[in-house]
Amino acid sequence: MAVIGGAVAGSEVARILAERGALAIVFEQNARPYGKIEDGLPRWHVEQRREEYAKIDRRLSHPNVLYVPLTRLGRDLQFPELVNDWGLSAVVLANGAWRDRPLPVDGAEQWINRGVVYQNPFIYWFNHYLEPDYAGPQYEILPGTLVVGGGLASIDVVKVLQLEATLRALARRGIEEDLLRLEREGIEPVLKSHNLTWQQLDVKPCKLFYRRTVLDMPLADIPPNADAKKVEAIRRAKIKILEKAQRKYLFDFQELSLPVGLIIENEQFAGLRIARTQVSEGKVKVVPGSETEERAPLVISSIGSIPEPIPGIPQQGEVYKYIDEKLGLLSDGPTAVFATGNVLTGKGNIKDSLDSAVETGTYIVERYLGLEPGGFGVGEAERAVVAQFGERQAALISARRPLSAQRVSAIIARVHQRWKAVGYDGDYARWIARVSHNALS
Ligand SMILES: Cc1cc2nc3c(=O)[nH]c(=O)nc-3n(C[C@H](O)[C@H](O)[C@H](O)COP(=O)(O)OP(=O)(O)OC[C@H]3O[C@@H](n4cnc5c(N)ncnc54)[C@H](O)[C@@H]3O)c2cc1C
């Protein structure tokens, strides 16, 4: 079978299939297979990244896994060809959720990277821009940037902005500080160690807007069976999380606020028009006549990630179209097509790993956000869900008639052809060492 994407989900499903004796061909668009762990989690999660990389490496090193790097479905390999011509038993899509949900403000798309920036490429830049051979888009750190969001990823974005702005302000004073220390200890204690205050730095903080109330922020899950007392406790815990994050990283926050327009002046992005909102019966309503202007050099939109459309894969709204969502089954036939991981859930979120206990849940979120010491098992929840799906999918796939030896040889010949084209010799460890020499981690 083929697996598209080699990260947390792809490597896990490949392992499950490989351990059942199947041959799993993992097509990965990048040279390295680490996905959101490398490009979506801010790089201060040093330990979690290292641990998760090692686990992915271990799974992809299984002798029944054939790793095919630098091969993007939809570009180097077409979906209809893979499903109709390769003669595979199944294809499992584990390509994640990499497209930012579009900012729903008139004209926003025309200002992309000219004042309007999306979270996914911004965090990608932050994680990679110090690498000597980084050649991707460059983003500026502009004090007073606005962020639209409300989930964990948007708090990551405000942290990047605040930490980078502080590092740059210190550098202008001839002080070189360490990002990891600043993230761990918080901005004020580090400034104090240099006999400075935030006011003295004179950096306009960035500001996070959320369309609902802080109590609605998706920072901790409310279990379906929670009683009123528990619901209230979780909601209160969210306020505390946000307050702690603001104290540590000094960003501004405004709830019940929705961007409704762009301010464009002299052909330049100059800010957002923000309306106040009311939440009633779970719905967000704009308060008529409440619009104000928020002037800023930049807005970063962090309102969710969805799977990228791939030619040939039918879509239903933001996600792929399933014939059985519980199984993650997109289509049946000689080659069945499944999906797993973020591509299936349409999100990659800490919520999924939350226990129903308030303390555990908020503790994990606080550790993720750097508000409490200690690490957290990034990827663990994802892997558990993927393993569950994977076992079910693998059982279905195993029930199919095994392919003939001749067919398998033909498939392997195609893999070897692609290996040749991308310069991969089949030695996973050697390849990873070769393509990692420039990586920060
Ligand atoms: C803010 C934030 C918080 C998080 N919190 C948690 C948490 O609490 N718990 C947790 O378990 N995880 C968390 N994560 C991690 C995470 O998002 C997922 O759990 C996990 O890493 C997603 O794995 P995935 O394999 O589904 O997707 P990805 O990591 O996105 O992997 C997809 C892979 O497919 C490749 N790919 C994409 N398109 C193609 C294509 N067309 N052809 C070939 N290859 C392709 C990509 O390069 C990538 O390697 C968090 C992430 C973020 C950003």
Image (cartoon, rainbow, N blue to C red):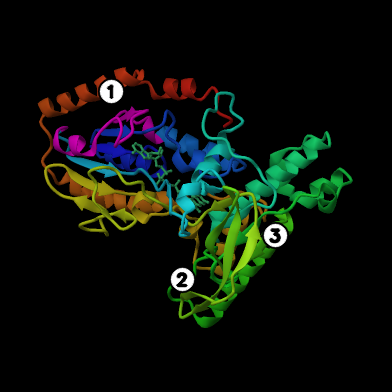
Q: Which residue is mark 3?
A: 246
Q: Residue 306: horizontal and vertical position, in percent?
A: 39, 52
Q: Residue 128: horizontal and vertical position, in percent?
A: 56, 34
Relative height, residue 3 to residue 347 (above, below) = above
Q: Which residue is mark 2?
A: 223
Residue at the extreme right: 195
Question: Which callout, 2 or 3, points at the residue further toward the start of the chain?
Answer: 2
Res 323 → quadrant: bottom left
* Residue 368 appears in the rendering: no
* Spatial CA span between label 2 and label 3: 26 Å
Residue 66 magenta-drawn?
A: yes
Q: In the image, what residue type sits under mark 3?
A: Gln
Q: Look at the numbered disc 1 and give the secondary structure of its residue.
A: helix
Mark 2 Cβ inside 8 Å of ligand 1: no
Q: Which span is picked out in magenta? A: 59-86
Within-10-Å neighbours for mark 3: few <14, some 14–19, many 20+: some
Residue at 54% across, 77% down: 288
